[in-house]
Amino acid sequence: MAAVLVVFAVVAAYLIYTNQGGGGKPVRFDVTVTHGDTMKPSELDVHQNDIVTINITCDSDGEVHLHGYDHAFDCKVGQVTAYSFKADKSGTFEIEWESTSRHLGDLVVAP
């Protein structure tokens, strides 16, 4: 009986340890930027090691920049611009409309 309890405890501890942080899952966001001024949703929440796909639609031509991961989305009216990456850095990363440095929102990567 003691051996069964030890095995149960080890398996439970392993499952708890591997599920902490919730990382490594595919996460997709469909984002809309209006007038280079606002972004919906304005906060994109993921966990470290998630595979993130961001699809951006803009109503005006311009560039959306994701700081920290240093990726630029070249937005064209009527087109969806997509970027996929592994969220390997934790923290809060600004998303801005490049030509005006207007803060649109944040990518928040939890450890």
Image (cartoon, rainbow, N blue to C red):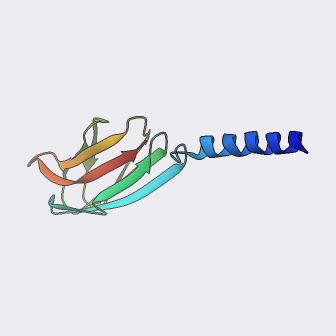
The picture places residue 8, in percent across and down from the top left corner, at 79, 45
Residue at the (88%, 39%) spot, across then down: 3
Residue 5 in which image quadrant: top right
44 on left or right of 50: left
Of residue 54 and residue 27, the one placed in the foreground of this image is: 27
At 37% from the left and 39% from the top, the residue drawn is 90
Q: In this view, does 39 lie above or below 82?
A: below
Quarter the N terminus occupies? top right
Q: Is residue 3 left or right of residue 30?
A: right
Q: Residue at x 45, y 41 (%)?
A: 48
Q: Residue 64, image x and y in percent?
A: 23, 48
* Residue that protrudes farthest toward the front in the picture: 2
Which residue reaches farthest left? 100
Please give left or right for residue 45 compared with residue 16 in the image: left
Nearer to us in this view, 9 or 2: 2
Query: Which quarter of the image is occupied by the C terminus?
Result: top left
- Which of these two is toward me, 64 or 10? 10
Residue 88 picture location, percent across and down: 43, 35
The reply to whether residue 86 is visible in this rendering is yes
In the image, 87 versus 37, the foreground residue is: 87
Q: Residue 41 location in percent, x, y?
A: 31, 63
Residue 56 visible in image? no
Give left or right: position of 78 versus 1: left
Number of numbered discs present?
A: 0
Q: What residue is drawn where x is 40% and y is 46%?
A: 110
